[in-house]
Amino acid sequence: MVEAVELGNRTEPDSATKEPFSARHGYAGNAGDAEISIREEAPEELRRTVIDIATTTGWDYDGLLNVASRIGKQPWEPSEPIASKKLSRLQLGNLVFTWDWYWVYDFIEQLYDSMAGWSVFQKPNLLFLAKILKI
């Protein structure tokens, strides 16, 4: 719920300087042996639904894969390689369903931020946000 409130109260971010969800909340790939006191997750249903919502709000699988291939990477690191003969939809699923849970939230934020600049009749980023908040 914190993420929903955080997304809903944001002003237009400067994507170049904004830290992703995982960095802002102190998550890393190797969390160590810390005791887990709160269960944090991104269930398979959420991962699937984010992709479904994105495709209904104007994204195609190639565009989603381009965003997804940068998740979890530093600006200087190369993105995940895109296989030439594999469908974008399958590659996207391979990434999204194998990420640590907090990278799913990074992905949601990246999609939202990218959609804020789209010039269409309706604001697709607000439609995306509204659908995500209903999950």
Image: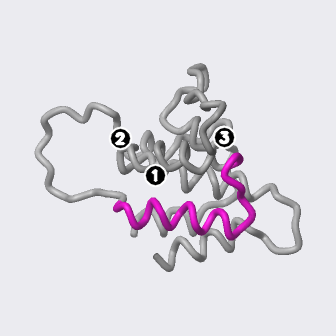
Residue drawn where x is 57% and y is 43% of the image: 68
Range covered by the magenta-colored residues: 43-63
| Mark toward the start of the polypeptide (2 vs 3) | 2
In the rendered image, which residue does mark 1 sit on? 104
Q: Which mark is residue 26?
A: 2
State if disc 1 and disc 3 touch (CB < 8 Å).
no
Q: According to the image, what is the colour scheme of the structure? A: one colour
Label 2 and label 3: CA atoms lie apart by 25 Å
Q: Nearer the viewer, residue 121 or 54?
A: 54
Identify the image quadrant of residue 66.
Answer: top right
Element class at badge 1: helix
Instruction: Please state which amino acid type lies under the numbered disc 2.
Output: Gly
* Residue labelled with disc 3: 66
Element carrying mark 3? helix
Q: Nearer the viewer, residue 104 or 98?
A: 98
Residue at the (71%, 55%) spot, across then down: 60
User: In the image, is 62 to the left or to the right of 31?
Assistant: right
Q: Amino acid at mark 1?
A: Val
- Neighbor class of circle 1 (other Cα within 10 Å; few <14, some 14-19, many 20+) is many
Residue 112, how many percent across, how many down? 64, 58
